[in-house]
Amino acid sequence: MVKVAAKSGGFLVNLMAMERYNPKQAESRWQQIWEEAGIYATDTGKPAPKYYVLEMFPYPSGRIHMGHVRNYALGDVVARYKRACGFNVLHPMGWDAFGMPAENAAIQNKIHPRDWTYANIDTMRKQLKSMGLSLDWSREFATCDVAYYKQQQALFLDFLKAGLIYRRNSKVNWDPVDMTVLANEQVIDGRGWRSGALVEQRELTQWFFRISDFAGELDEALDGLDGWPEKVRTMQRNWIGKSRGIELAFALTSPHAGLDAVTCFTTRPDTLHGASFIAISPDHPLSLALEAGNPELAAFNADCRRIGTSEEALEKAEKRGFDTGLRVKHPTEDRELPVWIGNFVLMSYGTGAVFGCPAHDQRDLDFARKYGLPVQNAFFMPGDDTAVLTEALVPAKSEKVVFVDHFAGISETTGQEAIDTTIAWLEERNLGKGITRYRLRDWGLSRQRYWGAPIPVIHCDSCGVVPVPVEDLPVRLPDDVTLDKPGNPLDHHPTWKHVTCPQCGKDARRETDTMDTFVDSSWYFARFTAPHHESPTDPAIASAWLPVDQYIGGIEHAILHLLYSRFFTRAMRQTGHVDLKEPFRGLFTQGMVVHETYRAQRDGKSEWVTPADVLIEEVDGQRTARHAKTGETLVIGSIEKMSKSKKNVVDPDDIIDSYGADTARFFMLSDSPPDRDVIWTEAGVEGAHRFVQRIWRVLGEAADELKSVAPAAGTAGEALAVSRAAHKTVKAVGEDIERLAFNKAVARLYELVNSVAGPLSEVAAGKADAELKAACKQAANMIVLLIAPMMPHLAEECWKMLGNDGMVAVTPWPEHDPALVTDEQVTLPVQINGKKRGDLTIDRNADQAAIEAAVLALDVVKAATGGQPPRKLIIVPRRIVNVVI
RNA sequence: GCGGGCGUGAUGGAAUGGUAGACAUACCGGACUUAAAAUCCGGAAGCCUUGCGCUGUGCGGGUUCGAGUCCCGCCGCCCGCACCA
């Protein structure tokens, strides 16, 4: 970047006349002007290329937090930038408003979930509006709006008709004291969070989406999602978990409970020689059948069920087993294996039974050592036949290994080849069937809670399950509910569930379960395209406006929300609501906002202290913290995600109040790359605010002189330098915003402002000639337009101050002159043996021979080579030269 | 436990396999001021033997003319794990 020498002195009067920028007054004024002009309301019929920017809509928890500020600041930059580039931008906002916190608040504070939710929405809407976001508020809705969940119920009915939804039994965490189903997060160490009672598992009949039918399709389509981060695609691919394996029947030596074999699913049939036991899930039919006659086994199973239903808890639990005493025959060898129950075997995956091969699986090995089961290698590494002792031999499938006396006739080959050969061999002999299996399970959507969308079906003793006729929708939530009574509020409501059957007219009961809140968020992006339409979507508009071009939200949604939305889009396609498969073309996952934590020691207990009450002092590089009110010495703790429990939160309202929305937005965009965590610091905000003031001052000082000047690029000297700097920045900032590299765009803006501050001072002092003034006017306008997506209010103020007409919000993005962004000369670093030893400035288009001659003529090179020709000379045009001696 | 990610000055970070530390924060020095704040100018990775010096991107290896970047093995931290949203 070209630095322009600054000249000082002679314009003190002008400088002192400059008032500090007052964001408070300016921001509310512009927000009102934008709103009155209606410039952010999207006409979906306008004939311009569409661009749909969407940030994940917030849960109305009470007040917005810094994570929201970051999320919406990021999205707003994209929205404003794309609008300036001529796109017809859709940028809506709504509320993910159903969910448990409203019920918890209701119980705690005796307030109705609906009142709590809508009050929070009012507060948060006001807060979001104070950020100056370019949102189309006319499309706003909350998922708890009757109008919204009515359409969701309509979708449910269509999906049900299309066979995309079914009912079956599945397990839940049951709190026997509160008589309620617990979420995984409500189970703490196997006990209910409120009652403290030992949690049990119960089977309930629940509704499921057939998402697993789409597993292969959802997996394959990931390849086409090149606008997504690779890590998210990998996470989804692993979650779907495609695997090729085989189901093998192990015949029981004596049939039990009507079963004469245990069928195991395995992806490693090549290790069958090393099989030493069978492990079945505590919920395997065989295990359930054995429970009746074996109290000890029943107690073991009950213990296993107390671990909970989350996969994490099951995996972390100590691996335990119970010998059933039953035995099975090895399918290819003349020996028998014991059948154990293992607490690590999931009934929901595969067949609920596996064969244990301790030599080649660490978990199986630990299990075998614990219970004295045999360990026998199925293969060895070439040239090393040491038997497995405490560490399982698990080489990559691509590595060659030597099989021991293998039934399929395999000797030395890779694991993968052995798997394929073995599956074919077993299939030929009718010993098993090779199958492709997915880890992805069907999506259970039933919730035994009040604050969710009612599932629109009716249970009739004569007709069975009867869908609510679509003309009877919505099925409204009743207002008068008791939430502090144990059990499902809709179930124990005195009248709500009692209805007549729409088919036969007899007395019947409503379904009292509500929908998982993931359902709400799986199609809201489609609803935004026609938020008031009388059916779930207007298919023509939805298909024209979807997919979302840029979706922005937290990495914590990388799997479930995004996968469910992808499924929903396919299901909506199948039922005629949209005509596309993938809802999100571009995806960006932003990092968290984190902050230091502070603790006070009180009565021997440690208490968290909020940053607003903390004074930080720094003496000789040592930072210490004191309580601002009590003066206590505080312990400075680790930097963690902002959370209420650790009190390390900063209220966006406070920041906007003292520094303004532009400063808050700008700080969120500067420094940290948006996909990484950002540490909120007071110093950082102040730095951002100083830049806001600096722009105002630097442009303001020269504004009077520039007002009536027509912008034009400079052709020589300082004016040319100014224009080069400005045009290069225009190009770079545009490219950075396209890549969502906002921190880099910010750095370039700092550079540009630094380099034109000097010339602008000259203008202010009346020392600039006409050409420099024109170049400065152009550069000043460019700065304003470049900062506009990030600091929209400041940009409007500056635009006006510089004598321009109209609103920045509707002004096109500036264009750069290609001739001004390329330098004729380039400076190449010259390395000798890979270490930098000098520079070579040479014509940009110099050919290899010219560069070679110039390099060899350099003193450093001559000194190093001693006049001898180098062993090798590497010249990368416009990048680097390396002389190898 | 499994899956994914991250790790660079005091700090946030920059760097299509090509000058490590752009830009900023904090800090230090100077100017202005009665003084402070603000502002402006300048300094700055570490080390020493101050040299066209050496070392340096979590740790240990490897590939390459050249590695922060690619590969292998560790360590630490963060996210997800299907009823939190």
Image (cartoon, coloured by chain):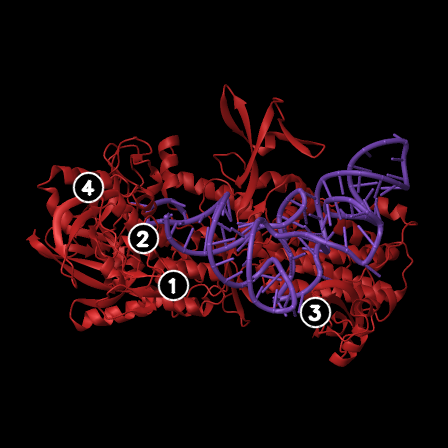
Chain colours: A red, B purple
Q: Are marks 4 and 3 in contact (CB under 8 Å)?
A: no
Q: Position of residue A417 (x, y in %)?
A: 32, 70
To which quarter of the image does residue A84 belong? bottom right
Residue denoted by label 2: A388
Helix, strand or loop for disc 3: loop
The subunit carrying tag 1 is A
Q: Position of residue A800 (x, y in %)?
A: 74, 56
Q: Nearer the viewer, residue B10 or A632?
A: B10
Q: Position of residue A750 (x, y in %)?
A: 73, 54
The subunit carrying tag 4 is A
C-alpha span from label 1 to label 3: 38 Å
Q: Is residue A788 visible?
A: no
Q: Is residue A385 visible?
A: yes
Q: Nearer the viewer, mark 4 or mark 2?
A: 2
Q: Nearer the viewer, mark 4 or mark 3?
A: 4
Q: Nearer the viewer, residue A843 or A139?
A: A843
The subunit carrying tag 3 is A
Q: Amino acid at mark 1?
A: Thr
Q: Amino acid at mark 3?
A: Glu
Q: Are marks 1 and 3 on the same chain?
A: yes
Q: Earlier in the sequence, mark 2 or mark 3?
A: 2
In the rendering, which numbered label is found on residue A301? 4
Quadrant containing the N terminus of chain A in the rendered view: bottom right
The subunit carrying tag 2 is A
Helix, strand or loop for disc 2: loop
Residue denoted by label 1: A537
Residue denoted by label 3: A815
Helix, strand or loop for disc 1: loop
Q: Are marks 1 and 2 in contact (CB under 8 Å)?
A: no
Helix, strand or loop for disc 4: helix
Q: Are marks 4 and 2 in contact (CB under 8 Å)?
A: no
